[in-house]
Image (spheres, coloured by chain):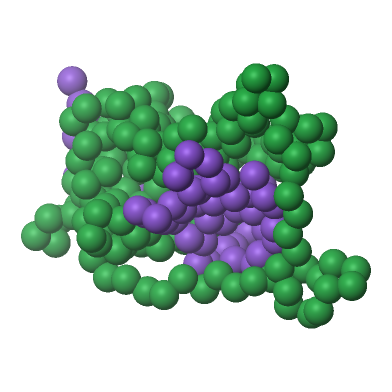
Amino acid sequence: MTTTSSLARSARRRAPALLGVALFALVIAACGSSSPTASTSSTTAPGASAGATTTSTAPAGGTSLSSKIGALSSQVQAAEKITFKAVYTTTGSGSNGSVTIEQAPPKSAFSSSGGSEINTGTASYFCSNANGQTTCYSAGASNPLSALTALFSPATALTELKAAQAEAVAHAAG
Amino acid sequence: MTFSTASFAGQSATCATIAAAGKNAKYCVTKQGILAYEGSSASSFTLTSYSSSPPASDFALPAGATVMSIP
């Protein structure tokens, strides 16, 4: 089973070396931190007190696990077509930061405090700001930083879940 | 593997927690299919703000930007 750290390593391997490493460094080294606003839970299960997190344990390799991962997969696939702006705080490697992911298909954007990747729908750019001057590097129609954007993709997380499911099935089968 | 629900930036999310072989990881996805949380003991990404209507200007090059082509 892989962890978030291995997810990050995997994404970095897939990213084009120069721009990939540059933007990942921006993400990790982004200045400023804020406290996560996560809270448990907005959903109240029957019999549970308001605000309680509902938790269930899926049997290893069972159909319940498959159906729940399948449901998540459907949600993730639907998200490929929606318009949204999501801001994340990141922690790790001794530093905290913030990144923003936006999409309005076919347009998308990924930004941190030090730079951004913008896909206008027809072309992709990596933009950085130095000494008050913004410079954007055109990457044509391709998106060289898609692997980094994928780092925050639920599809990537889903891949991890499916890998965990496969491992559970293999373990159950002996 | 356990499943739970949580709220991030006002968005309800389904979370899956994996704990095996001394490793722990948690992934949360909102009902819209957006990644809400991904974390382990070493690092984490947490959704802190969400909007379904980003400004169009966010998908345009910054005003006054110098554009260069990568060979």
Residue A125 percent coordinates (x, y): 32, 37
State whether residue A170 appears in this view: yes
Return the x and y of residue B35 as percentages of the image width and height. 57, 50
* In this view, A104 is above or below A106: below
Quarter occupied by the N terminus of chain B: top right
Q: Is residue A63 left or right of residue A11?
A: right
Query: Residue B40 placed where, x, y %?
Result: 43, 52
Residue A120 vertical placement versus A46 (above, below)? above
Quadrant hosting residue A77 = top right
Residue occupying the point 39% across, 24% down: A142
Residue A133 placement, left or right of A57: left
Residue drawn at x 54%, y 51% as measured from the top left: B26
| Side (left or right) of A17 relative to A36 | left
A162 sits left or right of A47 in the view: left
Q: Colour of chain B?
A: purple
Q: Toward which corner of the image does residue A154 lie, by quadrant?
A: top right
Q: Position of residue B22 (x, y in %)?
A: 45, 45
Whether residue A114 appears in this view of the structure is: no
The quadrant of the image that shows the C terminus of chain B is top left
Q: Residue furthest left?
A: A131
> For the image shown, how many numbered marks are present on the structure?
0
Between A4 and B9, the residue placed more toward the observer is A4
> Which residue does the image show at 54% across and 34% down from the upper left?
A160
> Residue at the location (83% across, 73% down)?
A48
Q: Is residue A37 above or below residue A77?
A: below
* Chain A, chosen colour in render: green
Question: Outermost residue, bottom direction?
Answer: A50
Depth check, front residue: A119 or A19: A19
**Extreme-front residue of the structure:** A174
